[in-house]
Amino acid sequence: MTLSLTLQRDGAEPLAIQIYAQLRAQILAGDLPAGTRLPPSRELAASHDIARVTVMQAYEQLLVEGFVRTQVGAGTFVTNL
């Protein structure tokens, strides 16, 4: 799965916040429906040439707010809101 993200490396917002905000918006808009598996953090980081920890921070914030759930060995999935 390829996510549509537009990142501004020299922007005022950190990259993790940009990723979080864009994924959250896509979830709320229904573009990423419940059950959708998000790409692994390594894959998303590599595809956008960013550090994996940046993606992990964004995913963690989505998890804390209940937008995604994780399943060990299976991945990160969008939840029912």
Image: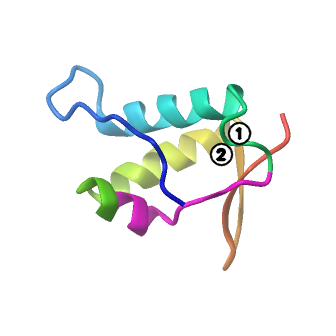
Nearer the observer: mark 2 or 1; the answer is: 1
- Asked which colour scheme the image uses, the reply is rainbow
Q: Circle 1 — which element?
A: loop
Position of residue 48 measured from the top left corner of the image (x, y, whole percent)? 29, 53
Residue 59, placed above or below residue 41: above
Residue 72, quarter of the rendered image: bottom right
* Residue 3 circle label: none
Position of residue 12 measured from the top left corner of the image (x, y, whole percent)? 22, 20
Q: Is residue 49 left or right of residue 73?
A: left
Q: CA distance from mark 2 to mark 1?
A: 6 Å
Tell me if mark 2 has few (under 14), some (14-19) or many (20+) residues whose alpha carbon lies within 10 angstroms of its own: some
Residue at the farthest right position: 80
Tell me, yes or no, whether the two marked residues, 2 and 1, touch with CB atoms within 8 Å. yes
Q: From which residue to which does the magenta span run?
A: 35-45
Position of residue 52 measured from the top left corner of the image (x, y, whole percent)? 34, 60
Q: Return the residue at label 2.
A: 63
Q: What residue is shown at x 30% (from left), y 64% (from top)?
A: 46
Residue 27, quarter of the rendered image: top right
The answer to whether residue 75 shows anywhere in this view is yes
Q: Circle 2 — which element?
A: helix
Q: What residue is shown at x 14% (from left), y 29% (from top)?
A: 10
Mark 1 residue type: Phe
Q: Is residue 54 left or right of residue 80?
A: left
Q: Is residue 40 left or right of residue 15?
A: right
Q: What residue is shown at x 68% (from left), y 26% (from top)?
A: 29
Q: Is residue 19 left or right of residue 77?
A: left
Position of residue 57 measured from the top left corner of the image (x, y, whole percent)? 45, 47
Residue at the farthest left position: 10
Q: Return the residue at label 1.
A: 67
**Residue 40 covered by magenta stretch:** yes
Mark 2 residue type: Leu
